[in-house]
């Protein structure tokens, strides 16, 4: 079954399984502040769920981005490497970070739906 | 946790709040880069009410401050301000501060928020003079107005030409009919003012500034912008670039060390250090490779770890990654290549002239 819906992790990544796109949530970009640099893992690399796939640097802090599922890194979003601010502007759209070849069947175990994630971030202390 | 008198204003403006030096302070109101730019190109305002303020009054006020600081306070004229430091007996920093001369027997000292209590205990423990130190930090708010359009903005609130207040001078006046100290000082590398006023009056002035400032493109600015602005201007931050392990001679602040002014705490060590020459100095560097240097990252020359980054950041106006670190004098020349350890990788950097940013006068 193909998943056309977006899923979120507790560490604020999102994945759209039908396209294999992975990024960070709007909440996460807001917490990080202005993003000025991103370092991505290698294209073609096999990653396991929880592996660091990117490091995002905002003006003030450095943050690891984790793979939301197992898979092979297919593509890196060149737009965000040349313009990391795109992640601030459109974190859940054009600011996607990498594309993963998702292994079928995709398991959403441990991931949250958009609604569940919205509820989850409300529980996080400011 | 303490809140400044402007806390509710920050919340209303949607600031991201963090704990800093025991206060809930605005980190940014949205984009720290835009805030940084507002200060470099127009005007920005900062709530710096967390800073500590002490009054020193009495017949021997001057002698007292001379003894606990290294700069020469006797050189100040009335309504003049200077940068100064409290030093330990080892000549290292207790804190850096501003000294305001309000009168021959009346001074105002402004210290770092994180050090207010430590500093006050330190100076009172050294008080053998006929003078009284008072910590008035909790009653005073401070708003910094910084940027090339600061004067134009502030002129709307005072009844005399602001050109008359020169750099590092101040006056006791009314700002928007609010009694205040208006000082031409700042921590951004731009022209600007710092206003000291009572807590009750602070929200009123803050709101007036934002309203009147709209046509100048004003932005409220948080701690992130404050840090990136001061770093571009290579202004030292206590706890990062200066601390009780380093002396002002090592920190490149020899200009505030007046060895001939008479006895003061730390003087003997500094006399000796000056004679022998310092072994390490605070240097500015620029990254040549990718990545942002951060506080405490290791610094290498060849295979040897020589120190660590004291301050490092992306510099929004210069659009470079820059930092400060102490380097052995023999490796401190402009052009010296160093490596910064970023996520277990050594990344090339180079010593550059400082300040990284200097405003056009």
Image (tube, grey):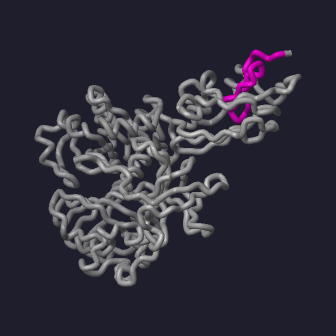
Question: In the rendered view of the protein, which quadrant contains the C terminus of chain A?
Answer: top right
Q: Which residues are magenta?
A: A2-24
Q: Is residue B68 left or right of residue B11?
A: left
Whether residue A107 sits left or right of residue B22 in the image: it is: right
Q: Estimate the x, y position of residue B5 in percent, counting from the top left.
A: 39, 40
- Asked where in the image residue B340 lies, by quadrant, the reply is bottom right
The residue shown at (65%, 34%) is A124
The residue depicted at 36 percent of the width and 33 percent of the height is: B219
Residue A58 part of the magenta segment: no
Residue visible at 52% across and 44% down?
Answer: A60
Residue B272 x/y as whole percent? 38, 84
Who is closer to the viewer here, B266 or B253?
B253
Q: Using the rendered view, name the quadrant where residue B306 is placed.
A: bottom right
User: Can residue B56 be seen by looking at this rendering?
Assistant: yes
Expressed as whole percent of the image width and height from the top left, the position of residue B327 reads 48, 68
- Camera-side residue of A62 and B201: A62
Q: Nearer the viewer, residue B225 or B9?
A: B225
Q: Residue at x 67, y 32 (%)?
A: A76
Rendered position, B48 above or below A125: below
Work out whether B13 lies above or below A65: above
């Amino acid at each position: 079954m193909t998943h056309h819906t977006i899923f979120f992790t507790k560490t604020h990544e999102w994945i759209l399984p039908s396209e294999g796109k992975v990024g960070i949530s709007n909440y996460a970009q807001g917490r990080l502040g202005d993003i000025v640099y991103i370092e991505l893992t290698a294209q073609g690399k096999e990653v396991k769920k929880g592996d660091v796939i990117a490091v995002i640097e905002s003006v003030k802090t450095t943050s690891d981005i984790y793979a939301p599922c197992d898979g092979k890194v297919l593509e890196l979003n060149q737009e965000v490497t040349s313009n990391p601010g795109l992640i601030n502007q459109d974190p859940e759209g054009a600011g996607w970070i990498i594309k993963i070849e998702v292994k079928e069947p995709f398991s959403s175990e441990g991931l949250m739906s958009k609604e569940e994630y919205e509820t989850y971030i409300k529980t996080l202390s400011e | 946790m303490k809140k400044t008198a402007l806390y509710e204003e920050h919340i209303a403006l949607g600031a991201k709040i963090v704990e800093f030096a025991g206060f809930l302070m605005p980190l940014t109101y949205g984009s720290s880069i835009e805030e940084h730019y507002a200060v470099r190109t127009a005007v920005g305002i900062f709530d710096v009410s967390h800073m500590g303020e002490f009054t020193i009054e009495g017949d021997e006020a001057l002698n007292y401050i001379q003894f606990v600081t290294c700069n020469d306070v006797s050189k100040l004229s009335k309504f003049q301000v200077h940068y100064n430091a409290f030093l330990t007996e080892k000549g290292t920093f207790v804190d850096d501060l501003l000294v305001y001369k309000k009168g021959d027997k009346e001074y105002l000292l402004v210290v770092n928020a994180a050090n207010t209590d430590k500093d006050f205990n330190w100076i009172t423990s050294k008080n053998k003079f006929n003078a009284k130190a008072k910590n008035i930090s909790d009653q005073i708010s401070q708003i910094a107005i910084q940027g090339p359009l600061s004067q134009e903005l502030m002129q709307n609130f005072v009844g005399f030409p602001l050109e008359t207040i020169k750099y590092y001078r101040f006056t006791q006046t009314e700002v928007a009919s609010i009694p205040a100290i208006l000082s031409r000082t700042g921590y951004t590398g731009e022209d600007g003012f710092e206003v000291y006023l009572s807590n009750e009056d602070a929200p009123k002035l803050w709101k007036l500034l934002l309203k009147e400032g709209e046509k100048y493109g004003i932005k409220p600015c948080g701690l992130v912008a404050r840090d990136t602005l001061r770093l571009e201007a290579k202004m030292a931050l206590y706890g990062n670039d200066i601390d009780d392990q380093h002396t002002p001679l090592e920190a490149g602040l020899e200009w505030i060390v007046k060895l001939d002014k008479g006895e003061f705490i730390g003087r003997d060590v500094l006399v000796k250090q000056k004679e022998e020459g310092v072994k390490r100095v605070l240097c500015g560097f620029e990254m040549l490779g990718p990545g942002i240097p951060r506080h405490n990252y290791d610094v290498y020359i060849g295979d040897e770890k020589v120190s660590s980054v004291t301050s490092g950041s992306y510099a929004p106006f210069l659009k470079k990654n820059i930092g400060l670190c102490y380097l052995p004098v023999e490796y401190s020349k402009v052009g010296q290549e160093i490596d910064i350890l970023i996520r277990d990788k050594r990344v090339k950097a180079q010593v550059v002239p400082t300040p990284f940013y200097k405003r056009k006068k």
